[in-house]
Amino acid sequence: MVLHTNIDKIRMVVIEEVIEETPSVKTFVFDDMLSSNAKPGQFLMIWIPRVEELPMSVMISNKKNHAAITIRKHGFGSTSLFEKKQNDQIGVRGPYGNYFSISKDVKRPLLVGGGTGLVPLMRLATLISKIQERCTIIMGAQTQKEVLFKDLAEEILSKIRTKIIVTTEDGSYGIKGVVTDALKYILKKEQFDMIYTCGPELMMVSIYNLSVTHSIPIQASLERYMKCGIGICASCCINDKLVCKDGTVFNDNQLSKMSEFGKVFRDKSGRPSNYSFN
Amino acid sequence: MVLHTNIDKIRMVVIEEVIEETPSVKTFVFDDMLSSNAKPGQFLMIWIPRVEELPMSVMISNKKNHAAITIRKHGFGSTSLFEKKQNDQIGVRGPYGNYFSISKDVKRPLLVGGGTGLVPLMRLATLISKIQERCTIIMGAQTQKEVLFKDLAEEILSKIRTKIIVTTEDGSYGIKGVVTDALKYILKKEQFDMIYTCGPELMMVSIYNLSVTHSIPIQASLERYMKCGIGICASCCINDKLVCKDGTVFNDNQLSKMSEFGKVFRDKSGRPSNYSFN
Amino acid sequence: MKNNASSPTTTNIKSIYKSSNMLSIDLAGIHLRNPLLLASGFLGISQEIFNRLYNDGLGAIVSKSISVSPLDGYKGPTVVSLGDKGYLNAVGLANPGSDVFAHEIMNNQIPLIVSIVGSSQSDFPKLISKFDKLNILGYEINLSCPHVAKMGMEVGDDPDLVTKIIKTIKSRTKKPVIIKVGIGNTDILKLATIIQESGADAITAINTIRAMIINVETGMPILSNKVGGLSGIPLKPIGVRCVYEISKKVDIPVIGCGGIFTWEDAIEYVLAGATAIELGSVIGYTGLKAFNQIKLGITKYLQKKDCKSIKEIVGLAHKY
Amino acid sequence: MKNNASSPTTTNIKSIYKSSNMLSIDLAGIHLRNPLLLASGFLGISQEIFNRLYNDGLGAIVSKSISVSPLDGYKGPTVVSLGDKGYLNAVGLANPGSDVFAHEIMNNQIPLIVSIVGSSQSDFPKLISKFDKLNILGYEINLSCPHVAKMGMEVGDDPDLVTKIIKTIKSRTKKPVIIKVGIGNTDILKLATIIQESGADAITAINTIRAMIINVETGMPILSNKVGGLSGIPLKPIGVRCVYEISKKVDIPVIGCGGIFTWEDAIEYVLAGATAIELGSVIGYTGLKAFNQIKLGITKYLQKKDCKSIKEIVGLAHKY
Ligand SMILES: Cc1cc2nc3c(=O)[nH]c(=O)nc-3n(C[C@H](O)[C@H](O)[C@H](O)COP(=O)(O)OP(=O)(O)OC[C@H]3O[C@@H](n4cnc5c(N)ncnc54)[C@H](O)[C@@H]3O)c2cc1C
Ligand SMILES: Cc1cc2nc3c(=O)[nH]c(=O)nc-3n(C[C@H](O)[C@H](O)[C@H](O)COP(=O)(O)OP(=O)(O)OC[C@H]3O[C@@H](n4cnc5c(N)ncnc54)[C@H](O)[C@@H]3O)c2cc1C
Ligand SMILES: Cc1cc2nc3c(=O)[nH]c(=O)nc-3n(C[C@H](O)[C@H](O)[C@H](O)COP(=O)(O)O)c2cc1C
Ligand SMILES: Cc1cc2nc3c(=O)[nH]c(=O)nc-3n(C[C@H](O)[C@H](O)[C@H](O)COP(=O)(O)O)c2cc1C
Ligand code: FES
Ligand code: FES
């Protein structure tokens, strides 16, 4: 075992285990002390040698000193990563960013995530299971085959009172619709102290709006184009905030001041574009 | 107070006190934790800004976290240093080198020094006064005015059985002659477990020869031209040893193998020359 | 300058002089509240971030180097930490292009210097025409990016081209023009003389130095561009040397850049001859609080040395 | 090269291959037991020290750069530690001169390369005539010392002079001639091509880079020569880049130098294209035990990667 002290230097890790979560999502488990100690919401920069470097949330692993990443196959970079095999090497640096804050006072936490946005929520759920007595999770997917981490969430939260609601857009599993449909419904019936969310930004905007309507504090983990991960390039900026350094997690107070939240993002060159609602 | 951890980086210190030891020798006291913790025989590299950098043994100071250097006015470098005043700044790095080893077993230590070679012996005497019951010192000078550290040695060793023998070449104080004259005499009368010496190399050669004759172990602190003090330039080499790194203190076993001891030294350019006996 | 004892960090601030006055400088006709500038390429694309950086204490902001058209830059990794406060980068001059950036800074209210970069002489008039009517202080011309073909250093290494570019720019703007140089294949002192003679108003030294890191496990270069530029602490003694030698050689002011992480580093550059300094990699290490920390250190140092203004110590090392 | 997991420092050495064979190399016709050379200027003036260094594990020794006449060098300080494994030096090429040094190594028995330095073309025939009959492996020509006027870099920056010097030397000796280059004012790749075309047998890259440190308390340059050369860790990414680019450009072997402190650093240079490597500043930091530590690390690495010889990985990074 090598003891690393500088989180910014790339550490080579071996993919010890590949878990096929859904047809388009895999989890890679590796030995890395620094990542295993990551807080929920923190991310790693993953070096895919000679291909790309991508930000990825730190996934939990049940092996000691191990951590994982969960990759959705998407464009060139993520697909190259997705195709790595057991025993292949990748580079990691981090963990970076701030994190979801939990406390004993948040007795009724509500976690809402979509797709790989569920990754930080699994680490959060692990912590919640240790200090709270109940937890509600709403998880969204397009279709049954793509439902992510449902069994894992049940396992993590098996010792406390847990409600897991799954939505699929095609209705092939759970509730038909998107997570906000389930959210609207449950907010009418139940009380929560805090909403934790991660997923597509437009989804989080809707969740944020609902949180405001119902006066529930919220913490949302944002994603932006990230090049450096260490707060020097501004490619990840949203208004005057650096998502990699000031975030990724922002609270309702911060979100309320972000005119670009759900509206404007910047591409590789730094050019701002508008989110298209569809 | 600034905490320094890297001994190699130059630390600026203020000369807090100037002690005029003899007409040609001064002691400068300064605040420096690293130097105050030096072991006997270790030396500093002293930066005289825009003039020179010179190796100097670490002198003791009775102030907490303080140390000192004792300078004999000689050529250009040492004279510039000698002329520094209270509140002037000099740079120090180190302490460097190995050191005199003392132990409880050395019940009858004999210290023999000449000129500023007495500096490391004062630090050694301080340690000896804490763990032994007796100590003998022979100190040499040219003339009465130049006798160095006699009162200091008496003070340091006041709590144990001490014999201090002073020799002057002109006989103006103590025994007339050089330290080896006194040494020859005392070795006939008394038993010693270890000889510690520092001073002009030819003096130390004579002392070494006497130590061999009387089968007494010896530790001698050598001086050589030093440029780096950190074992990279070899300007200080004596045979295959680096005086700054392997020394300055060598024992009888090492000295017996040094064909250059008292014979050959190197100048600034690295050219070897022979010591001239006079 | 007074030579005395105790460390500035332990001295109580005697507010004899207002520190704001102590730190203010004049740089090529521009008055700045303090000599700390943002180095180009750091956080340099968003007006809201500029405003934040200015609030965090900088004297002026230098934007990311802007080219006529947008550039996506290289694939990742574009920035690699070497540990020990050093970074390698090959961002590939990614920037939103002059149109979008001019729009971005349309309502700028803070002291902003636009860094521009071109692949041919004809790019520069286009760039100036985009920015010259905006509320900006002036330009920094990046003639020293060591890792983008036909841009930056390849220009800086051609003294004739440098002269032409400076004259072209100077004929089209009244604003100060700062030329940023680096360690390339041309004698930096010869270049500095040419820059002064061509009419530029100041020189920034230095940009990153062409460098590389290879991953030992895979045998592969880490940067996607393989070769990039070295920044941070490793650069400092080289940058200090360049500032010292350039400021002895020319009369126009020199802005020091390269590995400034602490107030001591900043002072070292100023003593070497820098009128102002630029901060870059320190942001990755210390974050934005670095600006005020460095300013505080400089202020205490000046007070300890009985200096009324930082201007008094610019180039002090020349006299030895 | 096999790509696999655990760190070499934790692997047990399977002594499948004799490590002596794994590490041996051929460099410009010279067979060396391992690729670790002493960098010129470190401990390089005494035969007895050379013997000790060889016993401590080096493959060959490169002497201090020797000039025709003795040089006292500059006053102190001549070496300044920057902390963080970096050094500045301006020794001023202090050396005992060719007569005394030829006498020093008269009975040499170990693999010794004599580094020579001259202030004019005519110095080199004199130097060769002093050493060519002695038992030495060959010569390293220092064309890159950045801080002694008229010696080293001022020569290396003049491509015509470089050609003349190499041809002069080659016509007077059959022993291999290695040219040591650095970051000066000439394109290092152009220089490398000229060096190869002029008939030199190998290139060492790189020497120290011109740099400076100013003491903040006094405002004074610390080195007595004011300006010196930067060595150690800060140099590494620049040296690796030079070795990578030079070894892609020329066919003669390249010796890597600059900031090699660990076996990983050594491997990085070899992957970049170095046939051998030189160790300098590490001695100030780790001492002489560094040699065997680095060799052990390289050996374990090669075993883990299933390589029979270090030769297999020279320049491996070129393929990406
Ligand atoms: C903090 C953070 C955490 C993330 N966690 C995960 C995770 O756990 N699992 C997962 O599968 N994905 C995660 N992502 C998304 C991931 O980094 C990639 O964006 C995604 O995999 C698409 O990459 P690609 O190269 O295949 O996309 P491409 O097809 O090249 O590009 C598609 C889009 O992906 C986005 N993208 C590409 N590169 C980056 C980049 N360097 N930084 C940010 N966005 C980029 C851009 O919006 C781009 O338009 C996370 C992103 C961020 C910012
Ligand atoms: C380990 C060590 C400890 C020393 N401790 C003391 C001490 O406590 N007090 C003291 O007064 N002196 C001490 N010296 C001697 C001191 O370093 C100087 O050599 C001496 O002060 C003369 O310096 P200068 O420049 O005036 O001599 P110069 O007149 O320039 O030269 C006279 C001779 O001094 C010697 N010398 C000059 N520079 C150096 C150098 N850099 N390294 C070694 N020798 C040099 C040479 O033999 C030279 O021939 C020590 C030397 C060493 C090696
Ligand atoms: C990620 C990164 C991007 C940079 N982009 C630019 C740029 O666009 N234009 C420029 O002139 N310099 C650029 N530089 C160089 C810096 O402005 C600065 O000269 C260099 O980093 C040295 O300063 P530092 O050590 O304080 O970082 C960049 C440096 C880095 C690390
Ligand atoms: C104190 C010192 C003296 C040096 N003397 C010489 C020299 O005489 N000839 C030479 O070619 N290089 C000389 N160098 C440069 C080294 O050989 C080497 O190129 C440089 O230090 C980089 O390697 P490193 O980082 O391992 O030290 C010297 C370097 C130092 C630090
Ligand atoms: S990714 Fe570079 S500042 Fe956030
Ligand atoms: S003084 Fe340089 S090796 Fe000893």
Image (cartoon, coloured by chain):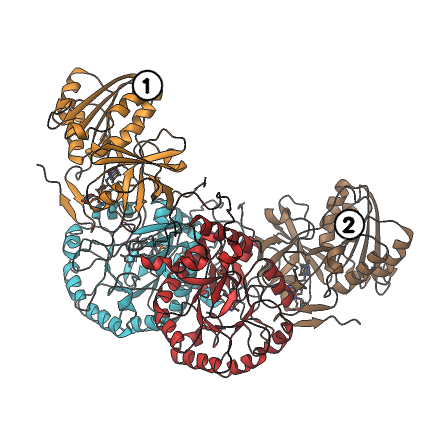
Chain colours: A brown, B orange, C red, D cyan
Residue bearing mark 2: A153
Amino acid at pointer 2: Ala
- Residue D43 magenta: yes
Query: Magenta stretch?
Result: D41-45
The secondary structure type at the circle numbered 1 is loop
- Residue C46 visible somewhere in the drawing: yes
Density class for disc 2 (Cα within 10 Å; few <14, some 14-19, many ≥20) is: many
Q: In this view of the protein, which residue sits in the foreground, B194 or A260?
A: A260
Asked if residue D109 lies left or right of residue D18, the reply is left
Asked if residue C143 lies left or right of residue D156, the reply is right
Labels 1 & 2 near each other (Cβ < 8 A):
no
Residue bearing mark 1: B132
The secondary structure type at the circle numbered 2 is helix
- Residue D313 visible somewhere in the drawing: no
Q: In this view of the protein, which residue sits in the foreground, C244 or A208?
A: C244
Amino acid at pointer 1: Gln
- Residue C32 magenta: no
Q: Position of residue A79 (x, y in %)?
A: 65, 65
Q: Position of residue D226 (x, y in %)?
A: 31, 57
